[in-house]
Every structure is written in C-alpha cells, then in structure tokens.
Amino acid sequence: MEAKIILLYESERDAEAITKAVSPDNVKTPPGLTVRTVRRGSSVVTLVRCEGRFETFLATINDLLSAVQVAERAISVGSSL
C-alpha cells in the first residue's frame, strides 16, 4: 500500500516548519513501513509505504495528520503573538 499526501501552505517558511515537525516520523518506523516527508517550495509531501496490515497503514496516516494538525496550530498561535 502506498499513499502520497501533499499539503499546501501560504509560505515556504510554514511548509518548512511542518516538515521539521513531522520529520521524526522519517526515522522511527517498524520494518515494512516507510514514511518520508520533504518540503517542495511551499508544499509538504509525504510518502507512506506499508507492506503490513491495512490497519497499520491507516494508523500511520492518522498519526501523521494529527502531528501536522498540532504543528499547524503552533504556527497559527506563534504568528498571532
């Protein structure tokens, strides 16, 4: 299974902050699961590959999007200060 998730932001700075926030996911994966996140301009592109169970695949995507949501909130709060 494979998913490509592309998130668009207003600035490269925001995209870089999101990429850095979720980049630990690039390293901490069990065998058969790969999560790679990169910034391309003002976009964040994540590729998720899973050779295991569908539940693992969905849980990984859910975890990734939850981390993105937290990072987006932090950026939003930080920019309003």
Image (cartoon, grey):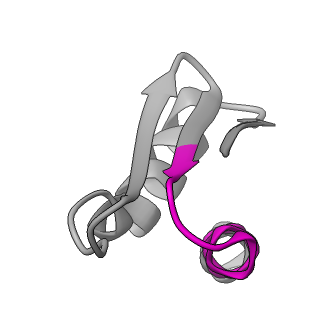
Question: Does the image show residue 74?
Answer: no
Tell whether 40 sits left or right of 81.
left
Tell whether 34 sits left or right of 31.
right
Q: Residue 79 colored magenta?
A: no
Tell me which secondary structure the magenta stretch mostly adopts. Answer: helix
Quarter of the picture holding the N terminus: top right
Question: Does the image show residue 53?
Answer: yes
**Quarter of the view holding residue 27:** bottom left
Q: Nearer the viewer, residue 22 or 63?
A: 63
Q: Position of residue 74 (x, y in %)?
A: 62, 80
Q: Position of residue 43 (x, y in %)?
A: 65, 28
Q: Nearer the viewer, residue 79 or 2?
A: 2
Tell whether 36 sits left or right of 73.
left
Quarter of the picture holding the C terminus: bottom right
Q: Residue 53 colored magenta?
A: yes
Q: Residue furthest top?
A: 41
Q: Residue at x 55, y 39 (%)?
A: 47
Q: Position of residue 12 (x, y in %)?
A: 55, 29
Q: Which residues are magenta?
A: 48-64
**Quarter of the view holding residue 10:** top right
